[in-house]
Amino acid sequence: MLRRLSFRRKLFLYFSITFGVFTILVLAFQFERERNFSKSNFEVTLDNITRLSYSYFRNQESYLKKDYWLMDSLTTLTVDHDIRVSIIALDGTVVFDSDVEDVSGMKNHLDRPELQEALEGGRGSNIRDSETTGRSYYYYARTFPDYFVRAAAIYDVDVRDSLHVEGLFIVYLVLLFVVFAIALLIITRRISETITKLKDFIIRLTSGEKPPSDLKFPEDDLGAIGSQITSIYHELTSAQQEIRDEQEKLFAHLDALDEGIAFFTPDRRNLLANKNFIQNLNLVSGQSAIKPEELFSLPAMDQVVRFIDRTLASPESINPDALPNMVEVMERSSRFFNIRCMFFADSSFEIAITNTTRLEKRKRISQEMTSNISHELKTPITSILGYLETLQEDDVPPKIRKQFLKRALRQTERLTDLIDDISSLNKIQEAAESYPMEEVNIRKIIDEVHQHLKMKLDAQKIRVNIDVSKRMEINGNVSLLFSVFYNLFDNVIKYGGEGLRIKLDNYLEDRKYYYFSFSNSGNSVEEVHLTRIFERFYRIDTGRSREQGGTGLGLSIVKNAIELHGGTITAKSRPGGGLVFLFSLSK
């Protein structure tokens, strides 16, 4: 039952019971104290009468001889005529009783309670009915050297009232209890308001709910504590959220890195590893599904493990201003890896594995490219220099001079085309963002290319069939798309021969791409060349290509421009002769 009560009611109940018990104890104590005080005052009156009676008796004893009935005049000396006075010998014999004329018939009074008490302590009192008179008395007895003197007051309403505790004190205590209960109700309400709000706050937290941010507490000490608790919670929550945000940024950053990174504790326990670390570790080890902690047992990682062992064996070598680190370059199955290990001040360490295969290949391609460019530039320049040196001679006939100038001009044009193609290709590969993208009409670009090359096509009697919608539009760059179709047509004109047929067809379309087929009916190309015709400076027939003025970069430009537009291109031999280029362009 108690468990079902609210905190406020429990608190009020506990305080009320405590104060109630305290009030009852105070009331009992004070009641007894008041009763004793009233009794003491009443007994003082009776004690005065006993002393006065004894004094009178002792002074008149020689005259009274044995006629103690003459002591009746003693009653006139008492303040209250209802007081009964008795003089009793120490053996219990009643000598005189103001209410009994003949005391000889009275029993021995030594066994009376008040006399027994007076015999032991000098004074004694008792309330009882008199055996002699049959009336109820309040007896008070005092022991003197040779007698007991007993004063008895009729125990009537007046005496009861004089001995009764004053009722005003009880009323006062009851009122005090009511006032305290009201004050307690107000105090418990304020205290319970704070406690209840804190309880609800904690329940919301434990149940996973978000507590209110505008929780108000009473303006007291307990309310200040509650406000401080909620404030600290919100600060901690905000700090935790910031930490989580930073962790997510770190995780996202690590996952976005091309570099594989893992962090380890001094006891070599893995704390964090991104996906590229696992992938690169598998490539280095030649195994699959390997765990980060297993790298310490890989033969391929011996050098790194030895470095880690040395560093952990001498922690004093870890200087925060110059943290220990090492780098190793290794090759595995035609792949190149850069492995770096670095320690931190707390002896934890980081291992990074970078797959540098692309960089190495690009480096080699760049070296080959430099060599090819040098070779391609050297040929026309050498030819131009040879013609110019010959023309310096004075005895060169005009006809020969004119012929040499034409050849030098042709080589100059070839050199210009080569430089332009190299520049375009480098720009596509290294500065693709410099080409602005916009909505362009593909058929319009194809028609411009066709018109631009019409004279050359007609000269070689090449027929062209274009099956592309005039409303086809994509997001692309006009200049690059023009280069794509120009180089495809120009390639046929230069190397295909006469009387050919060209067909450009948009054979398929889906939600993301347009698919094209560009075919010609010229000579077929051997399969060994089809996989390489998009490489820079690759020529199927080197002599014929140079003779026709080709730079060897046309199809490489086509491939890179199409990839920049989100598509792909492949080439295959056409049944019956010729080539087919299949490519796609993103919408």
Image (cartoon, rainbow, N blue to C red):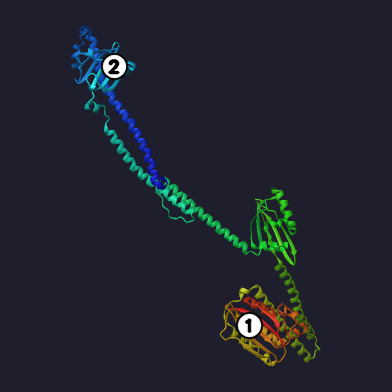
The residue carrying pointer 1 sits among few (fewer than 14), some (14 to 19) or many (20 or more) residues within 10 Å by Cα, namely many
Q: Can the viewer see residue 219?
A: no
Q: Is residue 233 visible from the viewing direction of this image? A: yes
Residue 142 horizontal side relative to residue 264, left or right: left
Secondary structure, mark 1, is: strand
Viewer-proximal residue, 524 or 491? 524
Residue at (66% x, 77% y) in the render: 560
Write down the residue under mark 1. Answer: 516
Q: Amino acid at mark 1?
A: Phe
The x, y position of residue 466, in whole percent, is 62, 88
Residue 313 horizontal side relative to residue 248, left or right: right
The residue carrying mark 2 is 142
Identify the amino acid type marked 2: Arg
| Element assignment for label 2 | strand
Rendering quarter of residue 479: bottom right
Looking at the picture, tell me which residue is in the foreground, 33 or 141: 141
Q: Is residue 488 above or below residue 356?
A: below
Which quarter shows the C terminus? bottom right
Q: Residue at x 72, y 68 (%)?
A: 360
Q: Give the numbered dot on residue 381.
A: none
* Residue in the foreground of this view, choosing between 453 and 162: 162
Callout in the foreground (1, 2):
2
Q: Nearer the viewer, residue 576 or 78?
A: 78
